[in-house]
Image: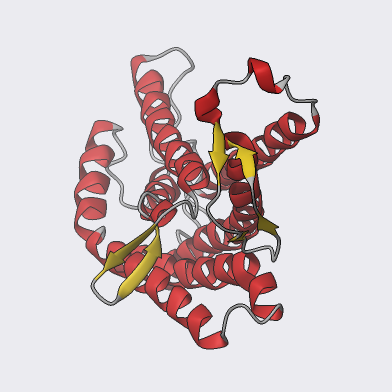
Amino acid sequence: MTAAAPQGNAPEFGSELYERRERVFLVLAGTFLCAMTLLNVIGISHFLSFGPLVVAAGVLPYPLTFLCTDLICELYGRKRANFMVTVGLCLNGFILLVMWLIDIVPAAPATAIPPWQAIELASDVGLPSGDSLSGTIQMFDLIYATTSGAVVASMLAYIAAQYCDVQVFHFLKRLTKGKYLWVRNNFSTLTSQLVDSVTVVAVTFGASYLAGERTFQSLLVLVGGNYAFKAGSALLDTIPFYILTAKLRRYLQLEDNAAEYGGEPSEHRA
């Protein structure tokens, strides 16, 4: 027989506790969506070197999304986490839609465009899609050419990784009967980060590999660099995850370690 949710787990609408819990969710979801969007804005516009690791600049804010996902999984339950991930997916689609609309709308006459928006390429620029750019182009054309493919890759990786993170987190929570917080935090993130790294590199650079412009070894280096950075970040976020979980449980009055806000009884309680 399933036990009832702890008293005060679902406060009345308009109460101070209800507002507090909704504000915290908004902050966590907003941080998640901001980091995810920033990933698409920065994308593969720049690559960074951390010793032997080579990672795209867009990877830097990405580990933060998994910390937010795990916190929402732990405090608000699977439904809220899946809802946030779905909203993020829709935002990815919105970014692509806006970029596509800008691309198909006729551009202003060259005389109306500021000179600094025209970029003269010294040589052909090869893109991950296998296409190339040359000559003098507008700034948006360069951004669109280098970003649109990365956003598509990001969407596919996002779908696979974020939903994987939520599912693995709750699977481990059931398996460990709500104990060992570090297990579900670390292993859900490590698994989903591997899925993300493989997917985003395969989709972004798959065309250039098929065209013979990249070797399989270079793809492995990119996957390895991305995953090593993300895995290291995932292990480092264990301490802030524990601290934030403990503090937010007290702040949101979810003292029962099994409790999830929203009145959802935890899946392992009987």
State the image coordinates of residue 11 (x, y, percent, origin top left): 43, 24
Q: Mark yes or no: residue 81 visible.
A: yes
Q: Quadrant of residue 247?
A: top left
Q: Quadrant of residue 142?
A: top right
**Residue at the image position 61 percent from the left and 69 percent from the top:** 205
State the image coordinates of residue 46 (x, y, percent, origin top left): 42, 54
Can you say whether 24 is above or below 169 in the image?
Answer: above
Q: Nearer the viewer, residue 234 or 71?
A: 234
Does residue 31 appear left or right of residue 265 in this picture? left
Q: Nearer the viewer, residue 64 or 49?
A: 49
State the image coordinates of residue 61 (x, y, percent, origin top left): 37, 49
Q: Quadrant of residue 156?
A: bottom right
Does residue 256 appear left or right of residue 41 in this picture? left
Does residue 238 appear left or right of residue 189 in this picture? left
Q: How many marks?
A: 0
**Where is the N terminus found, in terms of image quarters?**
bottom right
**Residue at the image position 56 percent from the left and 86 percent from the top:** 216
* Residue that extends furthest to the top in the rendered view of this protein: 14
**Residue at the image position 35 percent from the left and 53 percent from the top:** 60
Can you say whether 36 is above or below 44 in the image?
Answer: above
Q: Nearer the viewer, residue 260 or 168?
A: 168
State the image coordinates of residue 155 (x, y, percent, origin top left): 63, 53
Does residue 83 appear left or right of residue 63 in this picture? right
Q: Nearer the viewer, residue 13 or 169?
A: 169
Q: Mark yes or no: residue 177 visible.
A: no
